[in-house]
Amino acid sequence: MYRPCTFGIEEEYLLAVLASGRLLTSPSPAVARRCRDAAGQYFVEEMFRSQIEIASPIFGNLHEACEFFQEYRHRLNASLAEEGVGLYCASSHPNAPWLRQKARPSPHYRQVFDDYQLVARRSLLNGLHVHVGVPPGCDRMQLINRLLYWLPLLLVLSTSSPFWGGEDTGYMSYRRVICGEWPHMGLPEALPDWAAYERYRALLQPTGALAKDGDFWWAIRPSRRFPTVELRICDACPDLEDALCVAGLFRHLVEHNLQPRYDPMPLGRELRWITQENYWRAMRHGRFAEFIGLPDQQPVTAQGWLSQLQARHAVDTVDAERACQQAQLILQAGTSADHQRQVRARALADGATAALALQAVAAQVLAQGRGEPVTAQSSAGLAIR
C-alpha cells in the first residue's frame, strides 16, 4: 500500500456587492481590513484590489480540507456582509468592466502590470490551485509528464467562466483562453526530466525571458517554494464540493503515479498532441465535448474518460471514492458554467433584460459561495454548439 500524500489548496475570490452583484473596483479600507482579519494567516493579496486568495494549511484528507474552507468561506462572507459585500467564487464575472479595475499597488504586481500590460489588465480571473506533496528524490517533471493526459478532464469538472464582458463567450472556460495570452501559462514544456527543466530555466534566465527567481505559470508545474506538484489548470469552483472533487482526484492521480510498480501510459509526441487537443475541447465544450481517448485514439465522452481514470487508477481510498462520486454528479448535473448559463436563459425567458439576466447569474454565484445549493434544473440543453 502506498503512503498517502499531503496536499494544500489555494482559492481565489473576487469581491462583489451583494445587492447588485457588481464587482468592486477599489474596496474600502474597511472591506480590506475585514478580509485580512477574517482570513488571518491564510490571507494572500492578489493582482487586483478587488481580489483575494486563501492559501490553506497542509491537509491529510478531504474532510480536513472541507472543514477548513467551510469555516473560512463563512468567516469571510459573514464579515464582508457587514459592508454589503460577498465572495464571488467563479472564475469570471459576467459583466465586470475590467478596464476600470485597480491593480494591487505592491512592487511585485506593479512589475507584472508593467511587463504584461493589457494582458495583465484583462486577467480579472479566479483560479483553483492544488499542491500535492511528493517524496524526496521524486523527479517532478517525469511525474508531471505522467499526469498530463488527465489535466483537461480536471478542467472539465471545474469550468466556471462562460461569460466575459457581458457576453456568452461560447466557451465553458474562457479563463483558460485568456491564460493563453500569457507566456508560460499553457501546458508545460515537453521536458523529459528534472535535468532538462533546469537546463530550460538556465537558458531563459540569461536572456531576460525569466527572472532568476521567476516562476512558470504552467497548467501544472513543480512548485519552487514547496516540494510539490501544483495543479493550476482549473477554474475556481463556487460549489466547495466541486473544488474538493478536483483536489481529491488530482491527489489520487499523483499517489498512483508515484507507486514503484505503477505502469505509466507510454509517453511521446502523440500523447502530447492528444492532450493539447483535449485541452482545447475542454475549454470550448466542457462536459459536452467528444475527447480523444487512449490507448487507441478512440472517441470518448467526459463520462467515459472518467471511467477510464477509475479503471486505470483503482478507487481504493475513502477520499478517492468521494471525489469520483462528486465527479459523476458534476458530469450529470452540470458545472458552474452550465448553471450560470441556465440562470441567464431562465431570466431572459421570464422577460428580464440582458443586464438583469447577468445580474441573476452573479447573484447565483454569490449564493453558492455562501454554501447555498443550486436550485436550477439540469442544464444539459444549454451547451453552446
Image (cartoon, helix red, strand yellow):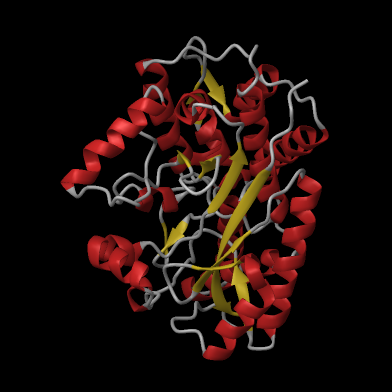
> Is residue 152 depicted above or below 301 in this figure?
below
Where in the figure is residue 50, as x and y percent of width and height?
Answer: 48, 75
* Quarter where residue 43 is shown: bottom right
Q: Residue at x 63, y 20 (%)?
A: 308
- Is any part of residue 373 visible from this angle? no
Q: Nearer the viewer, residue 238 or 202?
A: 202
> Is residue 374 depicted above or below 270 in this figure?
below
**Residue that lies at the very extreme toward the front in this rendered image:** 136
Q: Is residue 244 left or right of residue 63?
A: left
Q: Is residue 65 left or right of residue 131?
A: right
* Quarter where residue 288 is shown: top right
- Is any part of residue 55 visible from this angle? yes
Where in the figure is residue 121, as x and y percent of width and height?
Answer: 32, 67
Q: Residue at x 62, y 23 (%)?
A: 258
Image quadrant where one finds the N terminus: top right
> Is residue 216 depicted above or below 325 in this figure?
below
Q: Residue at x 60, y 25 (%)?
A: 305
Image quadrant where one finds the C terminus: top left
Q: Nearer the viewer, residue 278 or 220?
A: 220
Where in the figure is residue 251, as x and y percent of width and height?
Answer: 65, 36
Where in the figure is residue 166, as x and y percent of width and height?
Answer: 42, 67
Q: Is residue 8 left or right of residue 155?
A: right
